[in-house]
Image: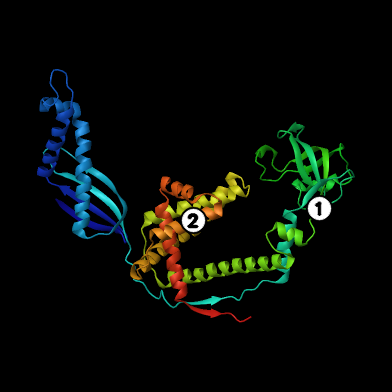
Amino acid sequence: MKSRIKNTEECSKLFTIEISRELVNNAVSEVYKNIRKVARIPGFRVGFAPQDLLERRYSKEAEEDVLKKLIPEGYRTAVETHKINPIGMPRIVNINFSLNKPLTFEAHVDTRPNVKLRNYKGARIAKRRISVSPGEVDETVSKLRNMHAEYVDVDRPIAKGDYAVCDVEAFADGKPISKATKNMWIQADKAVSLLGMGEELIGLTKGQSKEVEARLPGDYPDKKYAGKLAKFKILVNNVKEKRLPALDDALAGKLNAKNVDALKKEIESQLFARKEEALKIEMKNQILERLLKDNRFSVPSSLVRRQKEIFRERFEAELGQRGLHKDEAEKKVKELGQKLEEDAKSKVRIYFILDDISIKEKIGVGQNDIDARIEAIALSTGRPAEEVKSYYEKENLLGGLAEEIKETKVLDFLLEHAEIIENKP
């Protein structure tokens, strides 16, 4: 077998591979030998069909089998001969196959970049001082009281802040623009209600109705109505008043605290823990920025394209969740073209940097690490650990999970070995 190699990019190689006529003919003979064992041709017993009939009937299948055998073998031999460290599967092109002739083909393959690690230990990073103010605790308490609020039916006109349970019909250009909605809750507050209509309901009582005009948003899903003035017919079925629970030991008990003081201390502790985690992420990001600055090298273009596509799909999904129209979302994604490219390159570079650090510092991922992460996922999602593990196995996600764990362990290692400069208050 002969092979030549040349660089197409810094992290891409092109193999030109030739497999000798003798190896091709031997492979062809072996394939037809196997075909003869099972071929059913009228007039001949299985295993005794003549070669010329086999070649006429099974030439295509035989060629496919020969190529399936010889191309992977030839590629593996070329990789070993030239001592290449490939990434992913090769792209096979320009296959030339004929009986009694050498088989030739080309293989495009990406290779692992040559990373020469620099300055990965002892990075100088800033650490903010963090604290939790009484106001932040009070804000969280307020949110908890709102979560446990009761909505009580009242027999009086709607006041600001009340909730009206309504049937709503919407019209534009004299035509319905959607199906009638039954028992929609509308808060009587312009700032938080649908199209600011809530305040128009103040003063109405149960059983009363009102027509309200409001302009539809420019990104309204049905484009022919976007930006138009719409008329809403609103019938009040019920009026509800929001009543907050008292901040007392009874509420604290519902929230698994001994009393109000204990509740506030637990809230303070949780808020501080969240800030600590956010601070840790912030410091790790500083380390990543330093690694990217000090370790520059080219990365495989195919991995960059794949990562860019992942970023694009994720960004489009986020814009869709915000209610942005598809055309507008695609426009914003297009505007981010160059940034997505640079972000993708950085992501791929970081992968190789952290992977090389894990090799150099012997930071591995064991089964205990994976089991612990699965337990954490199960706890956060409220699912049994076995169910989570089964899902990751079925969807072939365990490899990705192991990579995430390894990245976390490497960054924890780098943070431990960083020079941390604590900011003065």
Residue at 27 percent of width and 45 percent of height: 93
Residue 401 on image: x %, y %: 43, 55
Q: Quadrant of the C terminus?
A: bottom right
SS label for mark 2 = helix
Q: Earlier in the sequence, mark 1 or mark 2?
A: 1
Residue 263 on image: x %, y %: 70, 65
Check disc 1 and give the amino acid type: Arg
Pick the residue in front: 81 or 423.
423
Residue 329 on image: x %, y %: 57, 48
Write down the quadrant of residue 70 in the picture: top left
Residue at 68 percent of width and 69 percent of height: 265
The residue labelled by disc 1 is 243
Residue at 14 percent of width and 33 percent of height: 32
Left or right for 258, reference 285: right
Residue 410 on image: x %, y %: 42, 67
Q: Is residue 109 visible?
A: yes
Which mark is drawn over residue 375? 2
Check disc 2 and give the amino acid type: Glu
